[in-house]
Image: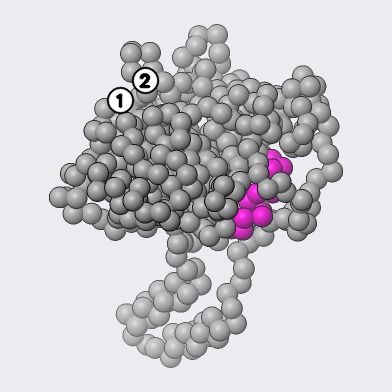
Amino acid sequence: MHVSELKAPIPLRYSSPSRLPSSSEEGEEEAEEKVMASPHPLSLLLLVTALASALHPPQQVLAVKPMPRLRTDSMILQNSIIQKINANPNAGWKASMNSRFENYTIGQFKHILGVKPMPRNEVIDIPTKTYTKSLKLPKQFDARTAWPQCSTIGKILDQGHCGSCWAFGAVESLSDRFCIHFGMNISLSVNDLLSCCGFMCGDGCDGGYPIRAWRYFVENGVVTDECDPYFDDIGCAHPGCVPLYPTPQCAKKCKVKNLLWDESKHFAVNAYRVKSDPPAIMTEVYTNGPVEVSFTVYEDFAHYKSGVYKHLTGDEIGGHAVKLIGWGTSDEGEDYWLLANQWNRGWGDDGYFKISRGTNECGIEEDVVAGMPSSKNLIVDYVTGDPKADASA
């Protein structure tokens, strides 16, 4: 297979999170002096704990308060929420009774929001990709039209009742990047990642960590969906057809007899965060393809139908991961991100949604992760990330 040659790369750098301000450093010195002066073990423990908290501040993403049982048993779709949003002339988006969740309780809806908050000490070790040169970016961008030869970009999938959004966002983005950079229209396996990553990624259908999914791609690779499909063949549209669907077992064996597990593996070169800055996120998507993003979901999001979403009403439910594929500006002049969800086409705008851009709405701009596809197990000559290049040539 011959692929177009790589254009001159955009300068970038990887960095660890910034140092704490000098005032924090002074506080650290004072804390150390107090620790040395205190002979009592309990006092020492409390001071060390306080110091650790100062050095590693908590992530702002996706810590959710438990709900009363009475609330979780209520239905997620509420006419009162729809009426409140649609009656608001400044809402910027429309709500409806999305058929996807017509029989869901709040508890069932909460279960499919499968992004777990990252441990604080692990966040600081994740490399962060930043761009040192501003690329001239278009005012509007859609990966589906930028790379029309990549059919995976426009696919809308269905995670079912399984809290596997963390796996979908990662697998879908990497699949797209294999097409963009290697000219390969392949769908990678959510099931491999979900069932075989184990505790390293989290708890399978009970939630996981997006960045660890990308690390799994680096260390273990992921087979194709043809080898290990998420969709079953017993008349059900997706594995999670019923509530409380358990995490599938890791078989490490292709469902198709003529495919070998190890030979079906596709790898990533790296796993990184993208700087929490709209131009950096836009440059990453424009240059390398879709990324996985996580954000906080509230009750009103389940009712989204069209427009540019902003949280208006309802309680916080959980953390969700999706694929970010572009951006633009609405007719009303509001900047937005364009994203593909995995709740089938009966939800939202044919499975897609837009959310306010540049304001970190619901934390959408602070937890962006991705990785580059690897040529391991592939036969290729060159790589391209140019949106205007034909990767299938």
Q: How crowded is mark 1: few (under 14 residues within 10 Å), some or many (20 or more)?
A: few
Q: Residue 241 carries which label?
A: 1
Q: Is 165 above or below relative to 178?
A: below
Query: Residue 336 location in percent, x, y?
Result: 55, 49
Secondary structure character of the magenta stretch overall: helix
| Amino acid type, residue under disc 1 in the picture | Cys
Is residue 232 at least partly visible in the picture?
yes
The one of 126 and 392 positioned closer to us in this rendering: 392
Q: What stretch is highlighted in magenta?
A: 276-288
Q: Which mark is residue 250?
A: none
Give me the residue at 58% from left, 53% from top.
Answer: 333
Secondary element under disc 2, as helix, strand or loop, is loop
Query: Residue 133 location in percent, x, y?
Result: 78, 57
Q: Is residue 144 left or right of residue 309?
A: right
Please identify the quarter of the rendering in which residue 196 is found.
top left
Tags 1 and 2 in contact by the CB under 8 Å rule?
A: yes
328 inside magenta stretch: no
Secondary element under disc 1, as helix, strand or loop, is loop
| Amino acid type, residue under disc 2 in the picture | Ala
The one of 391 and 347 positioned closer to us in this rendering: 347
Q: What is the number of callouts on the image?
A: 2
The residue singled out by tag 2 in the image is: 237
Q: Distance between the residues labelled 1 and 2?
A: 7 Å
Please identify the quarter of the rendering in which residue 202 is found.
top left
Q: Is residue 10 left or right of residue 291?
A: right
Give me the residue at 59% from left, 39% from top.
Answer: 325
Query: Residue 1 location in percent, x, y?
Result: 77, 19
Q: Is 100 above or below relative to 75?
A: above
